[in-house]
Image (cartoon, coloured by chain):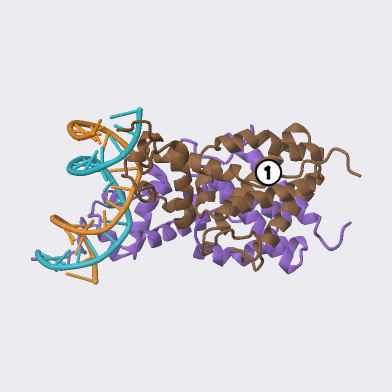
Chain colours: A brown, B purple, C orange, D cyan
DNA sequence: ACCTGAACACCGTTCAAGT
DNA sequence: ACCTGAACACCGTTCAAGT
């Protein structure tokens, strides 16, 4: 018997990464809030309990999945003016979260994910670079953050799931406008709200 | 046998109102997202299935409950300047929604409740009275609405449930500030964002 | 008409057992 | 160490039965 064959090829050989990847596929297909440990197990060709050897709970798995989604987003142009950075940040965030229904509400409902926490200072930087003093910069970012996650929670619920749905083209819920127009308007309000707070008005 | 006695006093005699009231009590106690048809039945001293003779589904019941909460809120001063009206609206909305954890996320995730839809035009009026043209008024309201429901979703999740919790005094999640400060700051940004869009700048 | 009780098709998760 | 299979304590809801 040749014992130097590579490790079994057909065995699933689970790992945290493999599980998160499968969860991403299932979440994209059925929606973030309808992801089930049993659906995940089917996707992996494995028993419902198998995943629990690599993640502590469904809660922790969802956090890993959410982080993977948030990290997979277009970076913003660090040399652009702050108004443009804010706009890019908003569209990149919306676009990466928009194709997972229920994700916005999920993220809203629990502590910041590690990825968000890690990016916190960089996000506040946009408002620091605008010229706001530290505390106002943090408050302005909190306002923007709240708005964006509310937007994702509200605007991604009713659409049919389209792969690679672009932020534009979809109709908004509250007003007769496209999502793109709504984001542009919201960002513009926050930009003006920020300008009005700058220590030195022109 | 005297048959003219009033209808049985001990029998629960369910009705939609009685059920919604009981659901409000349970939701306040355990949180909106942990309300269960079986918990509701216990509160009513009745079987898990009894409520289904008066509401079509849990979904419809939650909508009735959410509407009851939204309708039970401080009215705004119709004679105040629009900036003050917006501020009052924001605090009244936050205060009525804040004591039901999970309510913000629930409302974000589905179509507008009848109560919100009914109050829509009156809410947009605040921005009309500010001087915005119709479409901008609607977009501004949508921005404000999204921000507020995101805020409720985010800021009401981790606090211990206190009855009649006031909007102030509680610490915000994203920034070292009280919820009152956060709401004031957010409203101020939206006010300035609105002013910047007025057709006639002073 | 209104409520009960058992049951069904789901959940997340525990736990003993297999390899 | 890793996975399975049965089971537990929950869900929302259907359905036949009682009154």
Outermost residue on the front side: it is: A1
Apparent side of residue A151 relative to residue C16 in the rendered image (left or right):
right
According to the picture, the residue beneath numbered tag 1 turns out to be B184
Q: Position of residue B181 (x, y in %)?
A: 66, 38
Q: Chain of mark 1?
A: B
Q: Residues within 10 Å of mark 1 (few under 14, many from 20)?
A: some
Q: Position of residue A141 (x, y in %)?
A: 69, 41
Residue occupying the point 56% across, 56% down:
A154
Q: Where's the C terminus of chain B, which quadrant? A: bottom right
Apparent side of residue B136 relative to residue A59 in the rendered image (left or right):
right
Q: Position of residue A104 (x, y in %)?
A: 54, 50
Total marks shown come to 1
What kind of element bears circle 1?
A: helix
Q: Where's the N terminus of chain B, which quadrant? A: bottom left
Front position in the image: C10 or B40? C10
Front position in the image: B178 or A179? A179
Residue occupying the point 71% across, 61% down:
B127
Task: Tell me if I can see residue B148 in this picture.
Answer: no
């Amino acid at each position: 018997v040749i014992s130097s064959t590579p490790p079994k090829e057909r065995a699933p050989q689970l790992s945290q990464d493999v599980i998160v990847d499968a969860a991403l596929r299932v979440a994209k297909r059925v929606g973030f809030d309808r992801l089930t440990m049993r659906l995940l197990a089917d996707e992996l060709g494995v028993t419902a309990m198998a995943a629990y050897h690599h993640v502590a709970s469904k809660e922790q798995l969802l956090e890993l999945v959410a982080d993977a989604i948030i990290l997979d987003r277009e970076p913003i142009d660090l040399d652009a003016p702050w108004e443009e950075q804010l706009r890019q940040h908003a569209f990149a965030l919306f676009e990466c979260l928009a194709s997972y229904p229920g994700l916005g509400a999920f993220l809203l409902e629990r502590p910041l994910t590690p990825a968000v926490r890690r990016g916190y200072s960089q996000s506040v930087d946009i408002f620091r670079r605008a010229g706001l003093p530290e505390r106002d910069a943090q408050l302005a970012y909190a306002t923007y953050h709240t708005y964006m996650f509310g937007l994702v929670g509200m605007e991604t619920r009713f659409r049919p799931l389209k792969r690679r749905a672009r932020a534009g083209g979809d109709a908004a819920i509250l007003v007769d406008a496209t999502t793109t127009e709504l984001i542009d308007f919201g960002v513009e309000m926050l930009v003006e709200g920020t300008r009005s707070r700058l220590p030195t008005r022109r």
